[in-house]
Amino acid sequence: MTQVYEAFAAGRAVAVPGLDLELVRTVPFQPAPEAILLDPSRPFQPPAEEFRTLRTRLNHLHGRQSMQTVVVTSPSPAEGKSFVTANLALAQAQLAGSPSLLCDFDFRRPSLHQLFQIERGPGLTDYLQGHVELHEAMRKIDGANLFVMPTGTAVLNPLELIHRPETAQMLDWLPAVFGWILLDTPSLQTASDASLLGTLCHATLLVARLGSTSADSIDHAVRSLCRNNVVGIVANAAR
C-alpha cells in the first residue's frame, strides 16, 4: 500500500506519494576513512566554518527567491563537487527545521554511497523506474537531520531516465517535505545531465578547484548552462 506524507507548501496541503519519513531506514554515520565529511556530533569543528558560511549565503539568497532544489556540478571531473555537495548537505542539516535531502544524480560515476558507506541500492534509479516507493530509496543518517538518496541500480542510459516525467514530478514534490534538496551531478564535461537538471531545479552551484580549473572552462560551463539559475561558484582546495 502506497504511503502518503502530508505536508504544507504555499498554504496548501501537498501529498507526496510513496513518502513517509517514519518508514525511511536509519543508518549510522560512519563515513569512509578517506572521506572528509563534517561530523554531525561535532558541528562546530573548524573545517565546518567554510560550509556554514556557504550555507548562510545560500539561505540569504533563499530569503529573496524560492531556492530549495540546488544542482551542484563542476566544469570538469575531479574538482570536488561530491565533497562540496555532501558537506553542504550536512551543514544545512545542522539547522533546526525541515530536514535536508542529498541526492546522487551522478548515475555514471556515483560516489555518495561510498562516502557514507551505505548501500548503493535501492536508490534514485530504482524509484524513477517504479521499482520501489520513494521512502525505500532513501536513508536517514543517524544523529543528523539529513536524508540521503543514493544513485541506485546502474542504468544503460542515464539521460533518458532524467528525461522521464517522474524526475520532474519528484523534484516538484520534494520541497514540500525537505527544506533543502541538493543534487550531486556529473561534471559538465562528462555529460549534459547537470544542464538538464538545472532546468528542473531552482539553482545551480559550480565547483571549481583552485590551481586546476581554468577561467575559460568556467566561462564555458556557465554558457553551457545558458546562465540559467547559476547562483555562484565554490572555490575548492583553497589554502
Image (tube, rainbow, N blue to C red):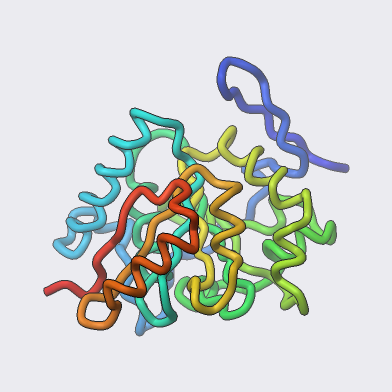
Q: What is the number of callouts on the image?
A: 0
Q: Could you tell whether 128 is left or right of 26 in the image?
A: right
Picture layout, residue 89 above or below residue 209: above
In this view, the residue in front, 11 or 167, is: 167
To which quarter of the image does residue 196 belong? bottom right
Q: Residue furthest top?
A: 11
Q: Could you tell whether 62 is left or right of 105 in the image?
A: left
In this view, the residue in front, 110 or 189, is: 189
- Residue plotted at (40% across, 30% down): 65
| Image position, residue 174 (x, y; %) | 61, 41
Picture layout, residue 36 above or below residue 123: below
Q: Is residue 100 visible?
A: no
Picture layout, residue 80 above or below residue 11: below
In this view, the residue in front, 124 or 136, is: 124
- Residue plotted at (37% across, 35% down): 62
Q: Residue furthest left?
A: 239
- Residue plotted at (82% across, 61% down): 129
Considering the image in quadrants, where does the C terminus appear? bottom left
Q: Is residue 228 visible?
A: yes
Q: Could you tell whether 50 is left or right of 151 in the image?
A: left
- Residue plotted at (30% across, 59% down): 233
| Image position, residue 202 (x, y; %) | 50, 42
In this view, the residue in front, 186 or 104, is: 186
| Image position, residue 175 (x, y; %) | 56, 37
| Image position, residue 1 (x, y; %) | 88, 43
